[in-house]
Image (cartoon, rainbow, N blue to C red):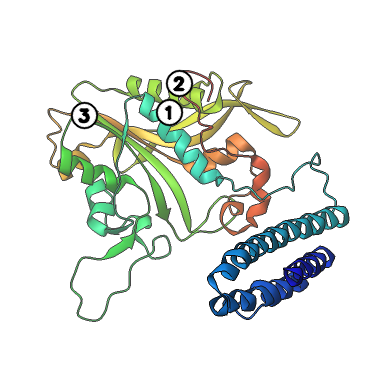
Amino acid sequence: MDDIAELKTRILGAVGAAGDEAALEDLRVASIGKKGEISLKMRELGKMTPEQRQAVGPLLNALKDEVNAAISAKRAALGDAALNARLQAEWLDVSAPARPTAQGSIHPVSQVTEEVIAIFADLGFSVAEGPQIETDFYNFDALNIAPEHPARQEHDTFYMHRETGDNRPPHVLRTHTSPVQIRHLEAHGTPCRVIAPGRVYRSDYDITHTPMFHQVEGLAIDKSISMANLKWVLEQFFSAYFGTSVKTRFRASHFPFTEPSAEVDIQCSWVDGQLKVGEGDGWLEVLGSGMVHPKVLQSAGVDPSQWQGFAFGMGIDRIAMLKYGIPDLRAFFDADLRWLRHYGFGALDVPTLHGGV
C-alpha cells in the first residue's frame, strides 16, 4: 500500500512539473504505457491471493484514472499557456480594416453589349446569332453586294485559306453581322424583330478601326413597317442608352442592302473638349440604316410584295467610346486591362427604357 502511495505522489508530482508536451508524453508512457510502472504493477495482481487482489486492484485502477486525468489537465494547461504566449507575441488588431482584395470587372464591350440587349429587349427585339466564319453568299451575295464591290477585295476582307482543289464556296471572317439576318429569315420566316450582336472582322487598324470589333445589327420585318418606325426605335434606344432625350437626323446615303438608305446622326455638343449627347446644335454620325432592299428579302425567301422592313447597324465599341469617354478603340483589345478598371462596370448596371439601371 505504501509503495502505491509513494508511486502516486512521485508520478503526480512529475506531471505537475512537466514543462512541455514532449515531457508529458514521456511521463504518460513511463507510468501507464504498456511497460509503465502502473501497468507492470497491475500485471502482478495475478500472483496475489484473492484477498490481496481485492485490496490492491481498486487502488491501482484509481491511480491509473487519476494519472490519466492529471495528464489531460496538464496537457490542456500547456495548450492554454502556448496560446496565451502566441497571442502576446502575435498581437492582432481585430478592429483594423481587412486587407484589400482584387476584384474582377466587366470589360466595357461586354458591358455595353448587355446594355444594348436589355434596351432592345424592352422594344420587343430578340437576339439572333450566327457563325463568325461565313460563306461569301451569306456575307455578300445575299445582301446584294455586287462581285466588284470593294468590300469583297482581299485588302478589306479576311478570306479563309483553301487547299488546291478545294471547290467549296469561298469562306470569310464575317465583315458584319448582317448574314445573321438572312439566316434568321430563312429559319424563322416573317414577321420578325431581332438584333444580332457579335464579333466582326475587317482588314483595318488605326485609332478608330481594329481587325476585330463588335457590331449590333437590327432587323424588323412586317407588312406595314416604315422609316418612321425606324426613327422612333433608334431615338428610343439612344435616349435610354445615354440617359437623356436624344434627337436623330437622317441623311440620304447608299448601302447595297437597303433602299432607301440613311446615315443616322445624333444631337450633340462639345463643351471644353467633352462630348455631350442630347444637347447643343452639333451632330455626330453613329450608324447606317434603311429599308431592307427587295433583293435581300428575296435572297432570304421572303416575298417583297407582301413584306417590308427596316435594318440598321452600329459599332458596339464605338458607342461604348462615346458613352464612357474612351479615346482610342485599340485600348479595348491591346491595352493593359488595369487601365479599364476605373470605368467601374458592374454586372447588373444596365439601363432600360423605364429609367434607372
Q: Secondary structure at mark 2?
A: loop
- Number of other residues with Cα within 10 Å of mark 1, as a class: few under 14, some 14 to 19, many 20 or more: many
Q: Is residue 35 above or below residue 339?
A: below
Question: In the image, what residue type sits under mark 1?
Answer: Ile
Per the rendering, the mark at residue 353 is 2
Whether residue 200 is visible to the viewer of this picture, yes or no, is: yes
Q: Which residue is drawn at the image coordinates 50% and 59% (left, top)?
A: 204
Q: Position of residue 307 (x, y in %)?
A: 17, 29
Per the rendering, the mark at residue 308 is 3
In the rendered structure, the answer to whether residue 342 lies left or right of residue 112 reads: right
Q: Which residue is drawn at the image coordinates 57% and 50% (left, top)?
A: 208
Return the residue at label 1: 119
In the rendered structure, the answer to whether residue 97 lies left or right of residue 304 reads: right
Q: Position of residue 194 (x, y in %)?
A: 30, 34
Q: Position of residue 44 (x, y in %)?
A: 59, 78
Q: Residue furthest right?
A: 88
Q: Quadrant of the N terminus?
A: bottom right
Question: In the image, what residue type sits under mark 2?
Answer: Leu
Of residues 102 and 321, the one drawn nearer to the viewer in this rendering: 102
Question: In the image, what residue type sits under mark 3?
Answer: Gln
Q: Are marks 1 and 2 in contact (CB under 8 Å)?
A: yes
